[in-house]
Amino acid sequence: MHISRRKVIGALSILLTSGPAIAAGQWWPPITDPPTGQHHPGRWVWAELLTRDVGTAAEFYGRVFGWTFETFGPADDLKTYTVVSSGGVPIAGMVFIDRPDASPARDARWVGLMSVPDVDAAARQVDKAGGRTLVAPGKLGERGRAAVFADPEGAVFGVIHSATGDPEDGIGAENQWLWIELWADDPAKMASFYQPLGGYEVIQGAVPGEISGVHLTRDGAPRAGILHKPAPVPSTWLPYIRVASVPDTVARAQAAGGKVVIEPMRARGTNVALILDPTGAPIAVAEWSRSREVAK
């Protein structure tokens, strides 16, 4: 993907390089209800939006993607948890960042969670390979066992062993998750870091058919891509949402208060764009036709 350095450097430099600070006493619902009883190690099965303003974020994502929301927890907003659904399917959560300062900085981020069979073993592997533990392995309410880490370049990610099983495997429907990729200084080195965590095979090309970057597969299914980051900004995992029309989605995002970082463009045989939600979290959108699913 050829992306303008000028367009990206200003917007993505807002990404945090420190660990997420989440309120104590947070309530964590299961990621699948009803339970599936299935686990897909190496698949990125969930995402959390960490933001100072859940209400503003929810209004944006509702207007742009038609997402719906259900909030759980006590009266204290900082300890509530908001489940995000698309087409009636839970796909993500939103939580308040509990920060001591009152600055108006837009410093939200999406954190993806990889399914693993053993969270504690994953933590040991991260430490051995030069990463950092930001949230130590532990049981999160009805959710299961999880932890949050930073890789050796500082990109934040989580792992989970869901108590109720992972979501059904496969490409998400429109307005659900399509892909996730790491923008890194050294894609080959980061592939070596993540390979044992997900039990991945490392394949040349950030997506199948490309020669730049790499992608990570498990049991023959592509799970994530790793690209050389296009500007000197913090390394980060970038999730993609599948949409029917990238230009229409971008127009809705602008009308809802989002910022377009990368205008709609052709990449990997489809249309993509990069936007920031009004609280500062970057998100990519891409089209994916039924014919591409069948070909894959």
Image: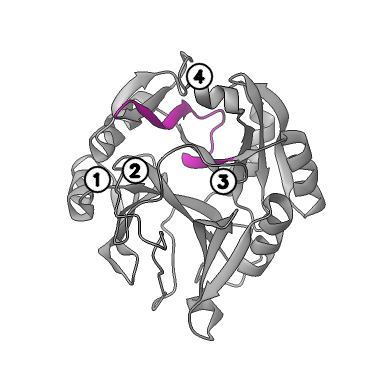
Distance from Cα at disc 2 to Cα at disc 3 = 26 Å
Q: Secondary structure at mark 1?
A: helix
Q: Position of residue 233 (x, y in %)?
A: 54, 38
Q: Is residue 73 left or right of residue 138?
A: right
Q: Are marks 2 and 1 in contact (CB under 8 Å)?
A: yes
Distance from Cα at disc 3 to Cα at disc 4 = 20 Å
**What is the magenta range?**
219-241
Which one is earlier in the sequence, the residue at label 1 or at label 3? 1
Residue type, label 3: Gln
Q: Secondary structure at mark 4?
A: helix
**Residue at numbered disc 4:** 295
Snapshot quadrant of residue 198: top left
Question: Which one is in front, 87 or 252?
Answer: 87
Which residue is most to the bottom? 75
Q: Position of residue 111 (x, y in %)?
A: 46, 52
Q: Is residue 147 left or right of residue 182?
A: left
**Residue at numbered disc 3:** 176
Question: Which one is in front, 187 or 272?
Answer: 272
* Secondary structure character of the magenta stretch overall: strand
**Residue at numbered disc 1:** 126
Residue at (30, 36) in percent of width and height: 194
Snapshot quadrant of residue 267: top right
Q: Is residue 242 left or right of residue 19?
A: right
Residue type, label 4: Ala
Q: Are marks 4 and 1 in contact (CB under 8 Å)?
A: no
Distance from Cα at disc 2 to Cα at disc 1 = 7 Å
Question: Which one is in front in this view, the residue at disc 2 or the one at disc 3?
Answer: 3
